[in-house]
Image (tube, helix red, strand yellow):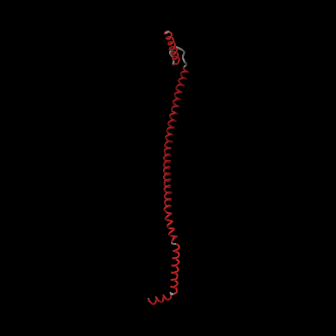
Amino acid sequence: MIKEKLAKSLIKFLNFILKMDMLLPGGLGLGPKMPDEMYKRLAKEFFNRDVELENKIEKAIDSIQKSSTLLSELEGILNEKSKKLQEIKLEIEKQTKMSEEYQKLVEINRFGAEPILNSIKSTVNEGKSSERVINIVISMVSGALFFILGIFWKDIMIFFKNIF
């Protein structure tokens, strides 16, 4: 049993060496050789795949860096716009508060001014009829005085000439 296991392991090992001999350029001379063209083709494919992979990785890194830069720029722009928006909101709030305060002042002035205006109106309207009567009397008296002075004007002038 041990001999069978050892034999199987030895066969596997020899098969492995034969396969490796076939893959190595020049080989150990134990088995068939792989043509040189195949080695060149395999090496070319292996190295080209690495170059392609490296190129793809570089492109991916470049695009990630560009994306990062672009995102940073966008973040800056958005921050500026949000600051401007906050300033506009504050200005609107200030104007709204000022408008509300102005409305309150207008209402206070209206309620405060109405009694004053009413008292002025009542005072003005209260004396209208009596003032009209007084004005008519004054006008009549002054008119009568001028009428009398006009009648006696000549005599008054002679009197004052004699005095002076």
Q: Residue furthest left?
A: 164
Kindly give the residue lying farthest to the bottom in the view shown: 162
Closer to the camera in the image, 104 or 116 = 116
Task: Residue 83 in the image: state x and y as whole percent.
Answer: 48, 46
Residue at point 50%, 55% (across, down)? 100
Q: Position of residue 107 (x, y in %)?
A: 50, 59
Relative to 120, say whether 94 is above or below. Answer: above
Q: Is residue 92 above or below residue 156?
A: above
**Observer-nearest residue: 129 or 147?**
129
Number of numbered labels in the structure image: 0
Residue depicted at 53% across the width and 25% down the height = 46
Decide: is 19 above or below 155: above
- Residue 33 in percent (x, y) is at 54, 16
Residue closer to the observer: 36 or 58: 58
Residue drawn at (52%, 79%), measured in percent from left and top? 137
In depth, the one of 82 and 94 nearer the eye is 94
Pinpoint residue 59: horizontal percent, then vertical percent.
52, 33
Q: Quadrant of the C terminus?
A: bottom left
